[in-house]
Image: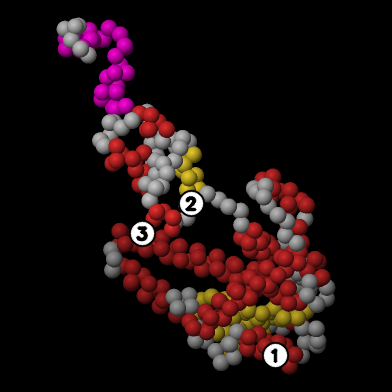
Amino acid sequence: MDGEEGHTINDDFRLMGLPRDDEEDLEECRLEVLGASQDAPVDLAADDGEGDGANAGEDGAAGTGSQTASTCAGTWERPSTSYVWDDFTKIFKVINGKRVRFWEYSPEVARTELCHLISRLDLPICIGESSAFEEYIKKAHNPRFATISRQTTTKDITKYFTGHRDKLIELLKSNVSSVAITSNVWNSNAKEDFVSVVTHFVNPAWELEKRVIGFRLIDVSHSGDNIAERIYAVLSEFSLIDKTFSITFDNASANANAMILADRRRWLISAMVERLTCIMDWEEGDARAQHSVEDKDLEAAFAEPYLGEDAIPEAGAEAVANAAT
């Protein structure tokens, strides 16, 4: 039997139930059972047409393809020959058998996010051009970061404020029938007083929301006419004159010592102070709305399997009734 082609002494031992004599043919048995490409890198994301999964259908059954081609699949990416891929933007590439997402530094995105950072954390407008901030970003995050001047940041904040204000105006115009206004007078370290205007409304989901829509400088006496003039200007800007059914105003003397602005804000014009204050409130409002949506989705996900589909509308109706009372 030893003379037969491909037959070894271990085959006889295997038939008799005896242990093998040596391991000389283990590699041969492995190839016979598992195939030639069982050690090749496996692309777990083969469903998108990249890696070994895309080649299996063309090379035939698993284990019959070329071992060289399978091994190389982990080090080079199969070229896309079809012209249809010319209309797509590639966002992934394969490096050493792993999918890596393309990432390009965008100065526009960096400038927009810097506006968010300054507004939400009440940072100096000149932080984008400071050497310490530049060193931190370049060493810890992105070596290609370019400093952003104070003038550019001021323009970006104004642009972001205008765009967000227009969206809020459209929301109040199309989805809100009536609003309640609260107002107050605050002062800064620079001995400048500001009138805040906050609108309270019920959104289409029957949830109470509030937004700061005005933070105007009042550099005259705090008479009723002067305060009313500034509140009226804000309401007119947001098209809320006909939708306002109540205005609540706190006594300014109760906030005579309220310090809400840092010392560095005293050098800013009143319009920029208003923009930064409104942006901070709008960002927090958007975050609260997003959290509310996520909480509702989570509640519905748990209610459906345990309480049934009929329980979800009832829960919503009960929530609306509780909010109304």
Pair 2/1: label in front = 2
Numbered badge on residue 228: 1
Instruction: Residue under label 2, please give it.
Output: 91
Label 2 sits on a secondary structure element that is loop
Residue appearing at x 80%, y 83% in the figure: 219
Q: Is residue 245 visible?
A: no
Q: Earlier in the sequence, mark 2 or mark 1?
A: 2
Q: Nearer the viewer, residue 121 or 256?
A: 121
Label 3 sits on a secondary structure element that is helix
Pair 2/3: label in front = 2
Q: Amino acid at mark 1?
A: Ala
Asked if labels 3 and 2 touch by Cβ distance under 8 angstroms, the answer is no
Instruction: Residue under label 3, please give it.
Output: 302
Residue appearing at x 80%, y 88% in the figure: 221
Q: Amino acid at mark 3?
A: Phe
Please tell me in which quadrant of the rendered image residue 322 appears. Answer: bottom left
Asked if labels 1 and 2 touch by Cβ distance under 8 angstroms, the answer is no
Q: Position of residue 301 (x, y in %)?
A: 36, 60
Label 1 sits on a secondary structure element that is helix
Mark 3, Cα crowd under 10 Å, few <14 / some 14-19 / many 20+, is few
Residues shaded magenta:
7-36
